[in-house]
Amino acid sequence: FMRNRIQAFISLPITAIDKLALKQELSTIGLMEGATK
């Protein structure tokens, strides 16, 4: 599960994404299967 979350994170287009969109994407990654609560 952690590998999937890391892959999702490194796939983000950080240079072309604004702060709000980045925060939303990180929240989505945090909700992926296997995330701690």
Image (cartoon, rainbow, N blue to C red):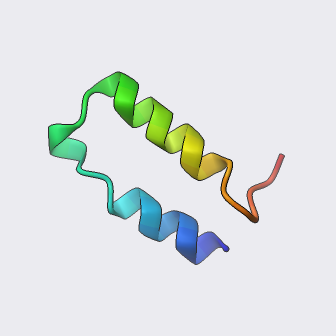
Q: Position of residue 32 (x, y in %)?
A: 66, 57
Residue 11 as seen in the image, left or right of residue 32: left
At 16% from the left edge and 43% from the top edge, which residue is drawn?
Answer: 15
Q: Which residue appears farthest toward the left when viewing the image? A: 16
At 32% from the left edge and 53% from the top edge, which residue is drawn?
Answer: 12
Residue 28 as seen in the image, left or right of residue 15: right
Q: Position of residue 33 (x, y in %)?
A: 73, 63
Residue 1 in which image quadrant: bottom right
Q: Which residue appears farthest toward the top when viewing the image? A: 20
Residue 8 in which image quadrant: bottom left
At 15% from the left edge and 40% from the top edge, which residue is drawn?
Answer: 16
Tag count in the figure?
Answer: 0
Q: Which residue appears farthest toward the right when viewing the image? A: 37
Q: Position of residue 34 (x, y in %)?
A: 76, 65
Image position of 19 with respect to 7: above or below: above
Residue 19 as seen in the image, left or right of residue 37: left
Image position of 5 with respect to 1: above or below: above
Image position of 23 with respect to 31: above or below: above
